[in-house]
Image (cartoon, rainbow, N blue to C red):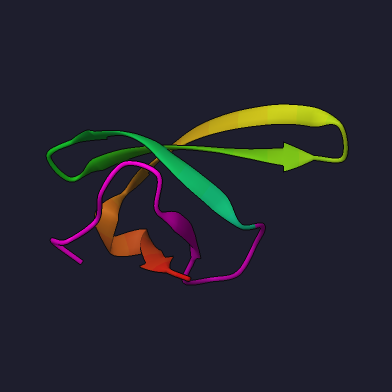
Amino acid sequence: MSNLKLGDVVCLKAGGPDMTVYTINGNDIGCKWFDGNELKFGGFIIQELEII
């Protein structure tokens, strides 16, 4: 997934909510998503994600 870019919508390969990529630092990807009305943030490695 080397063509991942800011603003892409991704999800975990294991399942979960749709997330938006907001930062990329090598293989470390920062994502944000909503859980109801609450904005959440998390860091993942690129191998855990797939583009929707």
**Residue at left 56%, top 29%?**
41
Query: Eyeballing the image, is 12 above or below 36?
Result: below
Q: Position of residue 2 (x, y in %)?
A: 13, 61
In the image: residue 38, left or right of residue 11: right
Q: Position of residue 17 (x, y in %)?
A: 66, 57
**Residue at left 48%, top 56%?**
9
In the image: residue 43, left or right of residue 1: right
Q: Outermost residue toward the right? A: 36
Q: Position of residue 35 (x, y in %)?
A: 79, 40
The boundaries of the magenta stretch are 1-17
Does residue 50 show up magenta in the picture?
A: no
**Residue at left 39%, top 62%?**
49
Q: Outermost residue toward the front? A: 7
Instruction: Please state, as top left, top right, bottom left or bottom right, where the N terminus lies in the image.
Output: bottom left
Query: Eyeballing the image, is 16 above or below 13?
Result: above
Q: Residue 43 versus residue 36: which sits nearer the camera?
A: 36
